[in-house]
Image: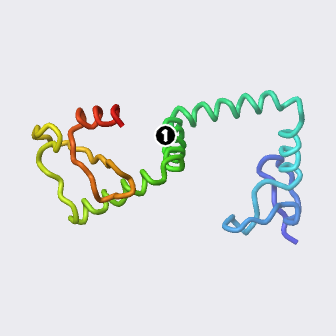
Amino acid sequence: MAVRTCSVCGIAKSEDEFPSRDGKIQGRCRLCKAYREREWRRKLFPENQARRSEQIRKAQAKYYARNGNSIHQAKAILAYRLRWPKKRAAWMAATSALKSGRIKAPACCQHCGMPEDNLQMHHPDYDQPLKVEFICPECHGKTRRID
């Protein structure tokens, strides 16, 4: 039987003392089973819980600093979609029809007649998803306040 040396303990042991791992040199991990078990138990003891929870809090704070806004935004979008399924379906149908050319966007607002590059689609009735009004953001805000 082959003998290996643990890279941490420095003790020569038989290959059976090392866990098998696919993709590793000689198909074995470089850390012996005894060391891995000691490390695993050390992490589970209560005296280390405070330190571990602090490490977890720091890691979570770091993660949310990078990704937090997108996570909260994704949750908000999902909640909105679940709350207003008709609105979402109408928006998807109108957007698809606009992209495919079944409906055309005019060059000016259909309420005030001002030429506008950034026209928004307004659905007066969500049961008729292709019946949309193309209006400027100002008129759309006024329409929303009335509805």
Taking the image as shown, residue 111 lies to the left or right of residue 25, namely left
Q: Is residue 47 above or below residue 88?
A: above
Residue plotted at (73% across, 28% down):
54
User: In which quarter of the view is residue 143 placed?
Assistant: top left
Name the spot of residue 70 as percent of width and height, x first: 48, 40
Residue plotted at (83% across, 50% down):
36
User: In which quarter of the view is residue 140 placed?
Assistant: top left
Q: Is residue 3 above or below residue 78?
A: below
Helix, strand, or loop for circle 1? helix
Q: How is the image coloured?
A: rainbow
User: In which quarter of the view is residue 32 placed?
Assistant: bottom right
Name the spot of residue 30 as percent of width and height, x first: 75, 56
- Report crowding for label 1: few under 14, some 14 to 19, many 20 or more residues within 10 A (C-alpha): few
Identified by mark 1, the residue type is Gln
Residue plotted at (14% across, 37% down):
112
Name the spot of residue 79 as percent of width and height, x first: 54, 44
In the rendered view of the protein, which quadrant contains the N terminus?
Answer: bottom right
29 vs 7, nearest the viewer = 29
Residue plotted at (42% across, 57% down):
89
Name the spot of residue 99 as percent of width and height, x first: 25, 61
Taking the image as shown, residue 90 lies to the left or right of residue 102, namely right
Q: Which residue is mark 1?
A: 73
